[in-house]
């Protein structure tokens, strides 16, 4: 069974690992190409956009794709919408593999906002030391608040994405460790953290570390994903879905 996995996430890689070496599935994992040196995967991959809904619909037909797993990041709203439309047009079964959002726990000091613009506002006027972990492509709005000192962590170098005078940029990628996160925040004298509500274990340690240190966390809510698409939260559940679907395929 020919499967297209829309990836770029830990969950997509976990599903790839489960499908590797199986003779009953022929998976292809697609990435947008945002990370220049993605971690190697044990199944065939392709990189780059499809060219919108029409391009994806053509790709599904040309590659004779029989099922699509949308395992993109919870904030990759465009790709998920395109997948829902293209799969609808071509009548290809679609499953969303999406990690649950984080929920605040006792001791958390969350400030929940709905956009990066609101996150900038929530920092306030007075200068603060901000740990900014929202991804390289979301940094620009923070240029409007140059009074703060930013500790920015991204996978790729930030280049000129954030034009403010006081920036410490570090490059690193998940998974992270709670003790190391706490030490980093202490060393850099961070007094507020900004994050997307990405969910998942790999980047949760910053939330736990902020709780331990009593720091506020500005949490940006997830964008809307297309409705009416069946959704699971784990690679195992996605594999079950594929196996059930495969069982039905003549
Ligand atoms: N946004 C985040 O916070 C975040 C965090 C970690 C990882 N990621 C991963 O990075 C990728 C891009 O995220 P984004 O927020 O830029 O997405 P997006 O805004 O939803 O997508 C923008 C465009 O990028 C292309 N694209 C996105 N995901 C793709 C994929 N898996 N394979 C091929 N093309 C893809 C599509 O181009 P065409 O229209 O030309 O097909 C899409 O229209 C996703 O794979 C996502 O899982 C995103």
Image (cartoon, rainbow, N blue to C red):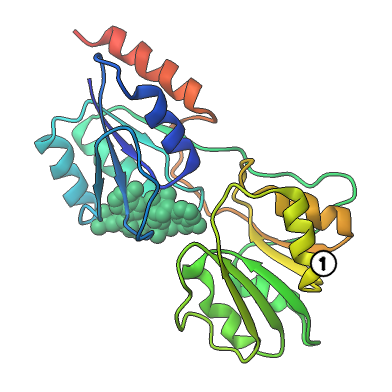
Q: Is residue 78 visible?
A: no
Q: Look at the picture and state if 122 lies above or below 198.
A: below
Residue plotted at (46% across, 32% down): 14
- Say left or right for 174 vs 184: left
Instruction: Please name the residue shown 38% across and 59% down the image.
Output: 35
Which residue is most to the left? 62
Q: Quadrant of residue 93?
A: top left
Ligand 1: quadrant of the figure: bottom left
The picture quadrant where one finds residue 1 is top left
Locate residue 32 relative to residue 222 in the image: left or right: left
Q: What residue is shown at x 36% (from left), y 56% (from top)?
A: 37
Callout 1 crowding tier (Cα within 10 Å): few <14, some 14–19, many ≥20: some
Q: Position of residue 191 (x, y in %)?
A: 82, 72
- The answer to whether 109 appears left or right of 143 in the picture is right
**Residue 225 percent across, percent down from the top left:** 47, 46
Report which quarter residue 119 is drawn in: bottom right
Q: How many labels sit on residues?
A: 1
Query: Looking at the image, which is closer to me, 75 or 12?
Result: 12
Q: From the image, which quarter does the C terminus lie in? A: top left
Is residue 223 visible in the rendered image? The answer is yes
The yes-or-no answer for disc 1 within 8 Å of ligand 1 is no
Give left or right: position of 190 versus 61. right
- The residue under label 1 is 186
Measured as percent of width and height from the top left, residue 205 is found at 71, 49
Image position, residue 106 (x, y; %): 89, 45
Q: Secondary structure at mark 1?
A: helix
């Amino acid at each position: 069974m020919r499967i297209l996995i829309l990836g770029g996430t830990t969950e997509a890689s976990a599903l790839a690992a489960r499908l590797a070496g199986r003779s009953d599935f022929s998976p292809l994992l697609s990435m947008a190409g945002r990370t220049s040196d993605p971690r190697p995967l044990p199944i065939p991959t392709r990189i780059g956009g499809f060219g919108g809904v029409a391009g994806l619909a053509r790709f599904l037909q040309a590659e004779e794709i029989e099922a699509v797993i949308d395992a993109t990041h919870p904030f990759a709203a465009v790709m998920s919408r395109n997948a829902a439309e293209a799969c609808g047009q071509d009548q290809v079964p679609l499953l969303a593999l999406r990690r649950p959002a984080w929920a605040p726990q006792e001791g958390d000091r969350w400030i929940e906002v709905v956009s990066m613009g609101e996150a900038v506002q929530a920092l306030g006027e007075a200068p603060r030391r901000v740990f900014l972990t929202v991804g390289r492509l979301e940094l620009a709005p923070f240029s409007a608040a140059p009074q703060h000192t930013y500790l920015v962590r991204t996978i790729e170098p930030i280049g000129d994405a954030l034009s403010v005078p006081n920036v410490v940029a570090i490059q690193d990628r998940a998974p992270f460790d709670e003790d190391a996160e706490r030490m980093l925040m202490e060393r850099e004298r961070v007094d507020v953290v900004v994050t997307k509500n990405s969910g998942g274990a790999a980047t949760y340690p910053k939330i736990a570390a902020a709780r331990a240190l009593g720091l506020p966390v500005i949490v940006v809510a997830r964008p809307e994903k297309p409705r009416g698409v069946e959704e699971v939260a784990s690679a195992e559940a996605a594999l079950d879905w594929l196996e059930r679907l495969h069982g039905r395929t003549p």
